[in-house]
């Protein structure tokens, strides 16, 4: 028909009508609010008042305080992710075995609980297990057990981990539920016929089948915990040094504002998360 | 086989109790008068709810949260919907770009994004740092993965590509096809994406706190300030928040589980 093969922007714009406006807006927003800040952080992490330097990274990795914060964040994230995935996988398997209607309703409920994180969750745990919390007082006065004397403390690392696990479990269930569909009843029955008991089935067939999904979900849960700020901030504020709170304090803190160091720490966090993302994309996306 | 199934049911029940415990605990605390060492409160009272609902600061924080969540959700959906459409119909590489963009919030959690935005906008001309404008942009970015995924799934489920191609064969232009053919059929996905966005943004604390701070007091900020008071008032706030989230999720569930209407074209 004699149509020109080379297309100009004007032709494209004319052809799409007004639809190209959202496209332009999208790119503008993404550039200003996603790409530019990321680039700025990277650039700033090598910057200082005296010019370009590696000093920020040096401080991040040599300072006892920040090394500890990094360690604490990693341990907290790994522990809460591991417990979360263990409970979540078992829960997903159990929910799957229920009737279709029941499992739908339960999943919807679990879906809403994924929203209960951050300040409201920290507060709810304070109401239950704080020093004058409902459960604490109940156990002290009625059952004679003083949990705070026995070493429990909601405002300690253990307490923080407990709260983190609470919001990891629903996420773990939502992540693993699509994957547990691959453990079919027919496979289990076949294994049974061939003489495998429960233990053998899970160790030889079940877990290996689920392993990519489990490891991939583990990455997501780990990233979820590492980036969590609101929950820790509301529960222990600046008393416990985790990476997320350190970064925020360095930028908005009154005493020790050091935006360059904050950017270095943020880049370290981003790098860890990128590794997690890479691992997850190799494992989880294939298995679901 | 029966014994095993009972074990699974028991596990699920225990799990549900565990998940419900903090929620119920907060709810009871918000209506409790005297509650010393019993399982349930000894007396009940609605005074804390009266207190917060007659507090203009609380009401305006609720309205602010609602405002910013709804506006942000509308902007996100309004921009991403046509882009996904264009990506599916013509610029296939756009879909790949989207997949990458959707992963960036994974490596830039709230804290990291905030400090980048604070520093960037402080350095840029114009007094934008610390304004709600920056917050809106940040909200767009963090909800991008969810909005994109929901809308993409919705396009897939109604087979949008075939519909539009059929319409174009019949002489319809592309933008007309978008408005009259695609839009009515992906409405479910659009509404559920809006509701999902709203529920996520209602719960955001880190971005509001770091980017705007007390200048724009949302429910989450109000709650954080209220933590210093006695426990009953914050628990009323938390219960109201959780009730709202529950309503939003319920709406989303209703919208998405309505029987699929047959594909129809608006005349």
Image (tube, grey):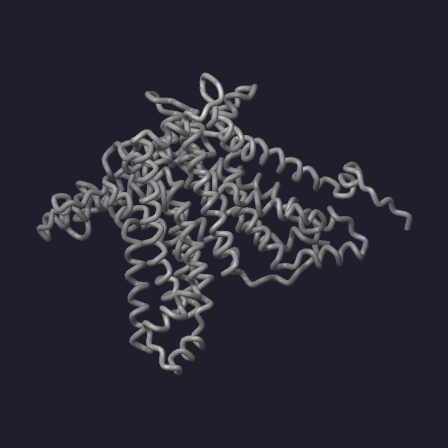
Please identify the residue farthest to the bottom as the structure is shown: A193
Residue A61 can be seen, yes or no = yes
Picture coordinates of residue A220, whole percent (x, y) = 43, 49
Viewer-proximal residue among B36 and A266: A266
Please identify the residue farthest to the right as the structure is shown: A2
For the C terminus of chain B, the quadrant is bottom right
**In the rendered image, the vertical position of residue B55 relative to residue B27, given as above or below:** above
Residue at 61% in and 53% down: B186
* Horizontal arrangement in the rendering, residue A10 relative to residue B249 (left or right): right
Residue B60 can be seen, yes or no = no
User: Residue B64 appears in which quarter of the rendering?
Assistant: top left
Viewer-proximal residue among B146 and A45: A45
Picture coordinates of residue A128, whole percent (x, y) = 23, 46
Residue at 31% in and 74% down: B4
User: Residue A215 appears in which quarter of the rendering?
Assistant: bottom left
Viewer-proximal residue among A33 and B58: A33
**In the rendered image, the vertical position of residue A172 relative to residue A119, given as above or below:** below
Picture coordinates of residue B16, whole percent (x, y) = 32, 58
For the N terminus of chain B, the quadrant is bottom left
Viewer-proximal residue among A246 and A272: A272
Residue at 68% in and 37% down: A21
* Horizontal arrangement in the rendering, residue B242 relative to residue A287 (left or right): left
């Amino acid at each position: 028909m004699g149509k020109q093969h080379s297309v100009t922007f004007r032709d494209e714009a004319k052809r799409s009508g007004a639809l190209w406006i959202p496209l332009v807006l999208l790119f503008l927003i993404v550039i200003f609010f996603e790409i530019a800040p990321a680039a700025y952080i990277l650039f700033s992490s090598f910057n200082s008042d005296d010019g370009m330097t590696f000093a920020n990274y040096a401080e991040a990795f040599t300072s006892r305080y920040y090394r500890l914060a990094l360690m604490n964040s990693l341990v907290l994230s790994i522990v809460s992710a591991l417990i979360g995935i263990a409970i979540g996988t078992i829960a997903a398997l159990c929910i799957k075995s229920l009737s279709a209607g029941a499992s739908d309703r339960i999943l919807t409920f679990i879906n809403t609980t994924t929203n209960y994180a951050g300040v409201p969750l920290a507060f709810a745990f304070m109401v239950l297990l704080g020093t004058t919390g409902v459960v604490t007082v109940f156990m002290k006065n009625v059952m004679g057990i003083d949990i705070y004397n026995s070493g429990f403390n909601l405002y300690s690392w253990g307490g923080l981990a407990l709260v983190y696990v609470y919001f990891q479990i629903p996420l773990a269930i939502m992540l693993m539920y699509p994957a547990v569909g691959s453990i079919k009843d027919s496979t289990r029955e076949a294994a049974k016929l061939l003489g495998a008991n429960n233990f053998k089935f899970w160790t030889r067939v079940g877990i290996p089948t689920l392993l990519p999904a489990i490891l991939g979900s583990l990455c997501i849960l780990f990233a979820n915990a590492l980036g969590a700020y609101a929950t820790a901030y509301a529960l222990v504020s600046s008393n416990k040094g985790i990476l997320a709170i350190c970064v925020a304090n360095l930028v908005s803190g009154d005493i020790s504002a050091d935006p360059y160091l904050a950017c270095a720490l943020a880049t370290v966090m981003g790098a860890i998360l990128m590794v997690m993302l890479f691992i997850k994309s190799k494992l989880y996306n294939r298995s679901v | 086989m029966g014994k095993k199934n009972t074990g699974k049911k028991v596990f699920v029940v225990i799990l549900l109790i565990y998940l419900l415990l903090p929620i119920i605990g907060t709810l009871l605390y918000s209506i409790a008068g005297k509650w010393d060492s019993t399982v349930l409160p000894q007396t009940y009272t609605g005074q804390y709810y009266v207190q917060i609902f007659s507090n203009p600061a609380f009401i305006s924080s609720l309205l602010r949260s609602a405002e910013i969540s709804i506006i942000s959700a509308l902007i996100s959906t309004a921009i991403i919907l046509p882009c996904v459409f264009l990506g599916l119909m013509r610029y296939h590489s756009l879909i790949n770009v989207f997949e990458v963009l959707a992963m960036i919030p994974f490596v830039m959690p709230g804290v990291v994004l905030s400090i980048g935005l604070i520093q960037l906008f402080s350095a840029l001309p114009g007094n934008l740092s610390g304004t709600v404008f920056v917050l809106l942009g940040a909200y767009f970015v963090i909800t991008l993965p969810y909005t994109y995924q929901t809308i993409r799934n919705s396009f897939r489920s109604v087979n949008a590509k075939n519909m539009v191609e059929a319409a174009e064969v019949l002489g319809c232009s592309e933008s007309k096809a978008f408005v009259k053919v695609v839009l009515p059929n992906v409405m479910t996905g659009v509404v559920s994406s809006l509701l999902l966005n709203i529920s996520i943004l209602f719960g955001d604390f880190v971005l509001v706190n770091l980017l705007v701070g007390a200048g724009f007091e949302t429910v989450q900020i109000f709650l954080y300030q209220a933590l210093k008071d006695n426990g009953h008032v914050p628990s009323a706030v938390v219960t109201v928040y959780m009730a709202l989230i529950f309503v939003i999720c319920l709406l989303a569930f209703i919208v998405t589980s309505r029987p699929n209407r047959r594909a129809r074209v608006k005349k």
